[in-house]
Amino acid sequence: MIGIYNPCLTNSLRQEEEGHIYRTLRKSECCTSILNENEESALTEYGDSLDKVSGEVLLCTKCRLCKTRQHAVPGEGLGSAKVLFVGEAPGEQEDLQGRPFVGAAGKLLTELLQSVNIRREDAYITNIVKCRPPNNRPPRKDESAACRPYLDRQVALIHPAVVCPMGNSAIQTFLDSEKSVTALHGIPFEVQSMTYFPMYHPAAALYTFGLRKTMEADFRKLRALLDSMVD
């Protein structure tokens, strides 16, 4: 089942010992909304596709951000990707090019992916909101709500093995937790057959140098998690 979840957070189940990562997922009772299993199946049955979602995003006028954007940014990557990265919102370069994570943060994301032998084109990358907020301010609740159906459809159509929400906004969207990325990063959560792996947003590491090593370690954990999963 794909949707937005409200997990009951308990003690960490991730252990790291002598450099080896052991896959242990936190399983939670939760409240679900939006797409149930029948609705998810209906997406492809009635002809939904990532191209259709992207086309709707490019023409979207559901919130005020359509008035200030240069280009909407639906997302890009492999339609059958094992891992889906979700950031907060497009920035200046993304707004100009219509592609996600093409600025300095995107360059770092690409480097982190390469460090664990994941090609950028083999992942799928998108954001909570698909248009740049003015002056890169945080998205407002109504803006995130307007974009959420697009995101839910992308998750359902891709059906990744792991969803990586990057930064507090993305983490709160998927996990509805009051805890910050500082507490949740690098810990996998299994909720109703979907695995979430919260991470810092790459932009944070551009301004706080020490976070780069933390992100590198989290990407190694992500690689180990993906390798442990059976197709």
Image: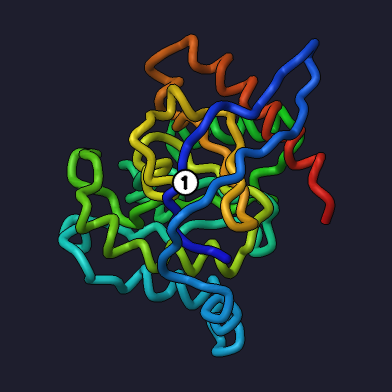
Q: Is residue 89 left or right of residue 82?
A: left
**23 or 166: which is nearer to us?**
23
In the rendered image, which quarter is residue 61 located in? bottom left
Q: Is residue 134 left or right of residue 221?
A: left
Most extreme residue toward the bottom, as rendered? Answer: 46
Q: How is the image coloured?
A: rainbow
Q: Is residue 202 visible?
A: yes
Q: Residues within 10 Å of mark 1 (few under 14, many from 20)?
A: many
Report the quarter where the C terminus lies.
bottom right
**140 or 41: which is nearer to us?**
41
Q: Position of residue 157 (x, y in %)?
A: 58, 69
**Placement of 82 over or under 13, stated as above or below:** below
Report the quarter where the N terminus lies.
bottom right
- At horizontal 56% and vertical 23% (from top left) the residue drawn is 215
In the rendered image, which quarter is residue 74 located in? bottom left
Q: Is residue 163 left or right of residue 71?
A: right
**Placement of 85 over or under 55, stated as above or below:** above
Q: Position of residue 116 (x, y in %)?
A: 73, 30
Q: Amino acid at mark 1?
A: Pro
Q: Position of residue 69 (x, y in %)?
A: 24, 56
* Tag count: 1
- At horizontal 40% and vertical 24% (from top left) the residue drawn is 204
Q: Which residue lies under the disc numbered 1? A: 7
- At horizontal 61% and vertical 37% (from top left) the residue drawn is 188
Q: Position of residue 33 (x, y in %)?
A: 41, 65
Q: Is residue 93 visible?
A: no
**58 or 188: which is nearer to us?**
188
- At horizontal 75% and vertical 42% (from top left) the residue drawn is 226
As helix, strand or loop, the secondary structure at mark 1 comes to loop
